[in-house]
Each structure stands twice: as C-alpha cells, then as structure tokens.
Amino acid sequence: MSTVSKAIRPCVALLVAVVFLSARAQFFGGGWSHRSSEIRDPELIREQEEMKKALAPGFSEDVFTFARLKFQGERNFRFGGGRLWDDDAPQADLSLTYRLHQVTSLKVRPGLNFIDITTKDLADYPFVYVAAAGRMVLDDAEVAALRTYLLNGGFLMVDDFWGDEQWHHFYEQIKRIFPDREPVALALDHRIFHTVFDFKQQPQIPSVGAFLRDGQSYDPGWPYFEKNHDPHYYAIYDDQQRMLAIICHNNHYGDGWEHETDDHTYFDRFSEPQAYPMFINILVYAMTH
C-alpha cells in the first residue's frame, strides 16, 4: 500500500462518522454567525490555538491537512492576470480550515501547508489544492510526481480559473500528467454534488471583486466563446474509476473562503451556501471513494 493510501485511512472513518452528523445542521440550520473582519490578527491567533487544543495528544498527525501546491506561473495576462499559486493565501486556507473545525467534528491541522510538487512532499498529504490553475506551469519532474501521487491514492482539487484561454492552458498541463486520460464532465446528478449537502444546481463562486463591481455570479472579462460562463466541473479517473481529481472551472472557491467577511451579501449567497458546503462534499467524496 502506498504512503498516500496509508495517510488517507485514519481520516476516512472520522469523516464519514462526523461530517454527516454536524455539517448540514451547522451550515443550513443557522448554527454559525459571521466572523468578525476586525482585529484579524488576534482572532487568527485565537482560532489557531483553539484548533491546536482540539487535537488529542499523540494524534496530531491523524487529522485532515489542507495542502496547497506551489508551482511556476505563466506570465501572460490572458492566463489569469496576476494570480499565482498563492492566490487568496493565507486567509483562504486559514478560514477554510477553521470553518471545518468549527462546523464539523473533523480534527484539522492548524497553520499553513504550502508544498512543493515532489514525490517526497506529496506523499504526506492525501488531499491537495491548486489555485490559479489557468496559470500553472509544470516541469517534467513535477509532472511525474503528480502522476505517481494521484495513481497511488492522492486527490487533487483544481480551482480559480475562468474562460476559454485559461482552460486550454490548464488542459495542456493536465494532459502532460495523463496523456491517456480525458477530463470527464460531471453532471448535477453526480454523487459529489449530494454527498453531504444536496445541491439543486452546480455551485459557482465568483471573485469577490467581480461580484461587488458587477453583481454577477461569474467573472466577466475573460473569453467565453467555446465554453460559456456557467460553472464546469470535470473529473479525472483511474482505470478502476476512482476519481483522482476534480476540476472546478469558472469558479473561485478561494475567494469564497478568503472574503467571507467582506460583504454580507457575498457571504450569504456564496460563502455559506456554496463555497464551504461544496468543499465538504468534495472532501467526503474523495476520502470515501
């Protein structure tokens, strides 16, 4: 059994047992409130300490870790402007992990986990996240490391890219990892949209600036001639039909986590009912299939 597969096992039973019990009531039952956007540093310190205290002695490694991949970025503006691998970090990562701690019984590693795309580093993290996917550039060693990681039990969530050109750029990179595998479009009836939270339409989280400026649920300004501006979800599967990756095109989950305190309308429309619940769906599905 691979290192990644072994790392997944302590999380699976915990996820199944507790996320179903607590998350739905907390999100849709009014069990939480807006976090303060004021005096952020002391609040972040308090949240991190709260998460540390929740970990049982001797079991600090048997927890969920949100890991973000580092990579080189394409510099052309049409592939995502100024966004890079650390788009929305650190606040998105800290908000997401604290919310998981707060509204589920899941034990979550505090702090930040920015990792290089190497076989050694990836082996410690069964779930990894990519932001600004439309700008990602991988070298040959990173391509090989990601292929090995995903085929040996790892899972990849891809986020934060819009329009035709960014899709084509990302597609070129993912095809280097899996030349013989195609991204498969996910329809609304796929189980991942209903694992914990039952979505009636596919979630779409716009960048907060685009929403506050234009009131749209997508980011205008990118070319949408081949693919419209609706959300597009794709999966990549192995030969046993295990999902290796979920690709969230025309979405910006990172902003839904990072900017939850910027505007009540954005929080009420995107962060609370979509960005956090859909991440829980993805996480539970990935760890139990």
Image (tube, rainbow, N blue to C red):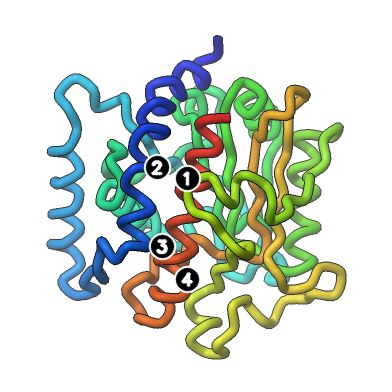
- Can the viewer see residue 279? yes
Asked if one can make out residue 70 in the rendered structure from this viewpoint, the answer is no
Q: Is residue 224 above or below residue 101?
A: below
Q: Tag 4: residue type?
A: Phe
Q: Earlier in the sequence, mark 3 or mark 4?
A: 3
Closest to the camera, between mark 2 and mark 3, is: 2
Query: Which badge, 1 or 2, is on the more N-terminal residue?
Result: 2
**First reached walking from the N terminus: tag 1 or tag 4:** 1
The numbered disc on residue 257 is 3
Looking at the rendered structure, the kind of residue marked 2 is: Phe
On the image, the x and y values in percent for residue 177 come to 74, 35
- The residue sitting at 53% across, 73% down in the picture is 207
Cα distance between the residues tagged 1 and 4: 22 Å
The mark closer to the camera, 1 or 4, is 4
Upstream in sequence: badge 3 or badge 1: 1
Q: CA distance from mark 1 to mark 2?
A: 25 Å
- Secondary-structure class at tag 3: helix
Query: In which quarter of the view is residue 44 placed?
Result: bottom left
Q: Are marks 2 and 4 in contact (CB under 8 Å)?
A: no
Quarter of the rendering containing residue 201: bottom right
Q: Amino acid at mark 3?
A: Trp
How many residues crowd around disc 3 within 10 Å: few (fewer than 14), some, or many (20 or more)? Answer: many
Using a 10 Å C-alpha cutoff, classify the residue at mark 1 as few (fewer than 14 neighbours), some (14 to 19) or many (20 or more).
many
Helix, strand or loop for disc 1: strand
Amino acid found under the numbered disc labelled 1: Arg
- The residue that disc 2 covers is 20
Above-or-below relation of 222 to 110: below
